[in-house]
Image (spheres, rainbow, N blue to C red):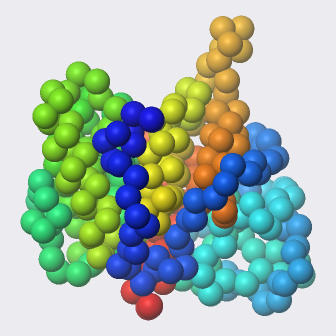
Amino acid sequence: MAFLTHFPVAPIHHHSSSLFTRFFLSPKPKTLLIFATLSPSHFSSTSTIIPSSSSSSSLETFQEISLPEETPIQIAQEKLFIPPDTEISSEKPPRILRGSNIVLSKYARDAQIVSAEFVKSSVETDACPSDGSPEFALVGRSNVGKSSLLNSIVKRKKLALTSKKPGKTQCINHFRINDSWYLVDLPGYGYASAPHELKQDWNKFTKDYFLNRSTLVSVFLLIDASIPAKKIDLEYASWLGQNQVPMTIVFTKCDKRKKKKNGGKHPEENVQDFQDLISKYFDSVPPWIMTSSLTNQGRDEILLHMSQLRNYWLNH
């Protein structure tokens, strides 16, 4: 397990964020969960829920970002990510973010980005901004499209440096959003051409950041949906789960289509395969979102998800 040789398995670490107690993902024995295969056109902001035994009240509707109405689909409740303080009812189905398994909650507000600016780069957690604002960290395999996604989220072409050469992000980079919270760009992993000593430094301070950053609301783990699941991505997700670090899976490059005659799979098929594989490691289904930096697919959904995590974190 290449990734775990970089981040050795340690005793369960209790993340200091109060949000953690409600959002953590528990490792479990290898029990496979079966997910329904859905094409992109079937992902809907409004879905029919197959109710479980306890569902009572309805959600508040969210009006700041308008999501298109589509034909309802059926999703089993146990396959949804239901935020804390959120109850769902079969009488009034909740809104589900399009291209995701995430239920909208009453905390989804103030999602739009008005301002974004680079603050600083750090090579250790203690040197990161200390104002106590909540933050979301983006991490993924080198060349997964991390900087492009960050630029898409903030609607700035050059806020984060993009490069055709993987491994350019070498520090913990903090970007101040709306003067109230942070997006954090972390070094990519799995870049074979980086010097061994540099890779060790990246892994060391990234690991320390995950385990000790008290203002970290959630890690957004980026997975390339244009290719089959990579072992290193599964290992990275497993490590985050083992150490109880809150995580959302962001599938990138969902606009890319491989030719079937060459054995390629469509992004939604790779997304499905990754979900099947990741289910072996978690008791509950991790939240996930399909995105494309080229078409801005998933941008508004990411912002809504971040807003409800952030507002819950601030209120608890």
Q: Is residue 237 above or below residue 199?
A: below
Which residue is painted at 39% across and 39% down in the image? 3
Q: Is residue 180 above or below residue 121?
A: below
In the figure, residue 273 lies in which quadrant? top right
29 and 162: which is toward the camera: 29
Q: Is residue 189 left or right of residue 127?
A: right
Q: Is residue 56 above or below residue 252?
A: below
Query: Percent x, y for residue 154?
Result: 34, 56
- Residue extending furthest toward the front: 11
In the figure, residue 61 lies in which quadrant? bottom right
Query: Percent x, y for residue 128?
Result: 15, 66
- Which quarter shows the C terminus? bottom left
Quick check: can you spot residue 110? no
Which residue is painted at 25% across and 46% down in the image? 203
- Which quarter shows the N terminus? top left
Q: Is residue 284 left or right of residue 254?
A: right
Quick check: can you spot residue 29? yes
